[in-house]
Image (spheres, rainbow, N blue to C red):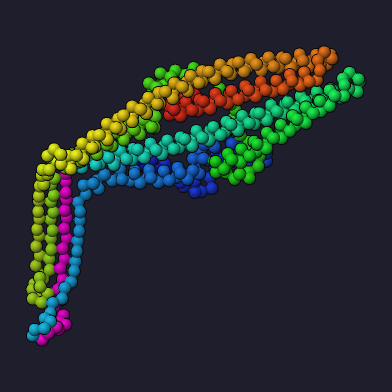
């Protein structure tokens, strides 16, 4: 039970920190607050109400698992009383005399043992293991959710940078167009088109900033920070690499540690233990023993001297009806076996579903990596095309609309690459969730 004590200490530590003034964030600088994905994960875990409730359930289960001896602890009892005796109608009738008072004391201990007791203790320990799995899984899910939100915000931030670069190009082109118009090299319509392009690019930047600010506030609420916090800087980047994940290897190495698979295996073990306990409790003999001591003067009116007595009993009960086919006890045991078989089928279905999920995610990541490589080539082509189109525009070989189309194609190619990289990063997180392991660091 050393592991149980460790969990309890960790639990108490987390709550003590959560209740204090500690913070996992960097100190606030003049330019705002800087948050890494690891800090965001820790803060989200600390402020999660559902996780705190799960931690309380875990603490209760750990306490029960640490006190398994209570399953065979004997029943103890003690009692004391006073009495009074007097005639009511005969002799002098009811009288109140001190000598008529009496008292009695007693104490007893009883113990009942049956063959299913060790199994009951194992079921309690299994309940703790199941609750620990639930807590760890909930904690990991919070981390995955925060990480996805974090990288989505990074992508939005990078998209704003792309839009601002597009605005800068539009403004530079506007200046060149204005000079060309003054020199009579382009028409007024072309000159006005460049001004429209600038304002359109500016509008896109403003919209992106507004949407990003809204999503940042949602993110701060998720990690337990004040949504009114200004100047929040997300430290990190969407770094990706071709992992070439082997679905069969991942299934072989990690399928058995998925929380849903482990949880179903625990359910089967719990049902098997419950069936065995029921069989032993109902079919095996049970032993009961008790000892009781009592003392007192006997009848209060007799004014007898104090006397005491001790008595004990030992009995063995042998059930008979569970051995008879068709009885209710026998039917209950058969029903328990049916529940076990259904749980095994559920486990088989969960394993097949998990294997299919892992294979689909690996196939999707392979396709996404191919998409990223194509998107990178498209960006290179779009950049080269824009440079050539700009040179042709300066020479009067193409119109301003052609140049604008080329610039829009460039920003679209960069946004498509950013979207593909984000999708790939989120796909990695989905695969890590599916195998319940950090596969990027492998």
The residue positioned 8% from the left and 85% from the top of the image is 91
Q: Give the range drawn in magenta.
A: 92-115
Asked if residue 38 shows in the view, the reply is no
- Tell whether 106 sits left or right of 433: left
| The stretch drawn in magenta includes residue 111 | yes
The residue nearer to you, when weighing 339 against 29, is 339
Estimate the x, y position of residue 45 in percent, counting from the top left.
49, 40
The residue positioned 27% from the left and 35% from the top of the image is 339
Q: Is residue 82 above or below residue 436?
A: below
Q: Quadrant of residue 183?
A: top right
Estimate the x, y position of residue 49 in percent, counting from the top left.
47, 45
The residue nearer to you, when weighing 428 against 103, is 428
The residue nearer to you, when weighing 149 against 408, is 408
The residue positioned 68% from the left and 33% from the top of the image is 208
- Tell whether 45 sits left or right of 26: left
Estimate the x, y position of residue 166 in percent, counting from the top left.
73, 26
Residue at the limit of the structure toward the right, as seen here: 183
- Tell whether 290 sits left or right of 195: left
Residue at the limit of the structure toward the bottom, as seen here: 92
Q: In which quarter of the image is residue 115?
A: top left
Number of disc labels: 0
Q: In which quarter of the image is residue 100?
A: bottom left
| The stretch drawn in magenta includes residue 408 | no
Q: In this view, does 69 lie above or below 80?
A: above
The residue positioned 43% from the left and 46% from the top of the image is 53
């Amino acid at each position: 039970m050393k592991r149980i004590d460790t969990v309890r200490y960790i639990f108490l530590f987390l709550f003590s920190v959560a209740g204090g003034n500690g913070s996992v964030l960097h100190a606030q600088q003049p330019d705002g607050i800087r948050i890494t994905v690891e800090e965001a994960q820790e803060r989200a875990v600390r402020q999660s109400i559902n996780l705190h409730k799960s931690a309380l359930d875990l603490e209760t289960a750990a306490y029960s698992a640490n006190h398994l001896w209570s399953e065979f602890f004997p029943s103890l009892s003690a009692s004391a009383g006073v009495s009074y005796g007097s005639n009511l109608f005969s002799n002098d009738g009811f009288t109140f005399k001190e000598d008529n008072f009496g008292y009695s004391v007693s104490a007893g201990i009883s113990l009942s043992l049956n063959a299913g007791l060790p199994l009951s203790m194992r079921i309690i320990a299994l309940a703790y293991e199941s609750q620990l799995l639930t807590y760890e899984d909930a904690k990991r899910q919070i981390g995955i959710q925060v990480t996805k939100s974090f990288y989505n915000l990074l992508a939005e931030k990078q998209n704003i940078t792309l839009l601002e670069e597009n605005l800068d190009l539009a403004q530079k082109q506007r200046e060149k167009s204005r000079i060309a118009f003054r020199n009579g090299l382009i028409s007024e319509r072309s000159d006005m088109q460049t001004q429209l392009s600038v304002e359109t690019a500016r509008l896109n930047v403003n919209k992106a900033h507004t949407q990003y600010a809204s999503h940042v506030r949602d993110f701060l609420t998720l990690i337990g920070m004040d949504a009114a916090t200004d100047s929040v800087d997300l430290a990190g980047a969407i770094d990706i690499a071709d992992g070439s994940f082997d679905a069969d290897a991942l299934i072989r190495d990690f399928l058995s540690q998925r929380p849903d698979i482990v949880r179903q295996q625990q359910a089967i073990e719990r049902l098997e233990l419950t069936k065995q306990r029921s069989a032993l409790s109902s079919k095996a003999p049970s032993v009961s023993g008790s000892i009781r001591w009592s003392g007192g003067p006997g009848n209060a009116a007799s004014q007898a001297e104090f006397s005491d007595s001790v008595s004990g009993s030992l009995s063995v009960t042998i059930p008979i009806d569970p051995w008879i086919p068709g009885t209710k006890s026998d039917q209950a045991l058969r029903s328990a076996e049916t529940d076990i078989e259904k749980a095994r089928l559920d486990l088989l279905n969960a394993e097949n579903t998990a294997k299919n999920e892992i294979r689909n995610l690996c196939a999707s990541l392979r396709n996404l990596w191919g998409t990223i490589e194509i998107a990178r080539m498209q960006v290179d082509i779009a950049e080269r095309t824009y440079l050539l189109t700009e040179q042709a525009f300066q020479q009067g070989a193409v119109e301003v609309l052609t140049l604008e189309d080329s610039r829009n194609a460039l920003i679209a190619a960069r946004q498509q690459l950013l979207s593909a990289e984000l999708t790939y990063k989120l796909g990695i997180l989905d695969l890590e969730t599916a195998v319940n392991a950090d596969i990027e660091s492998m």
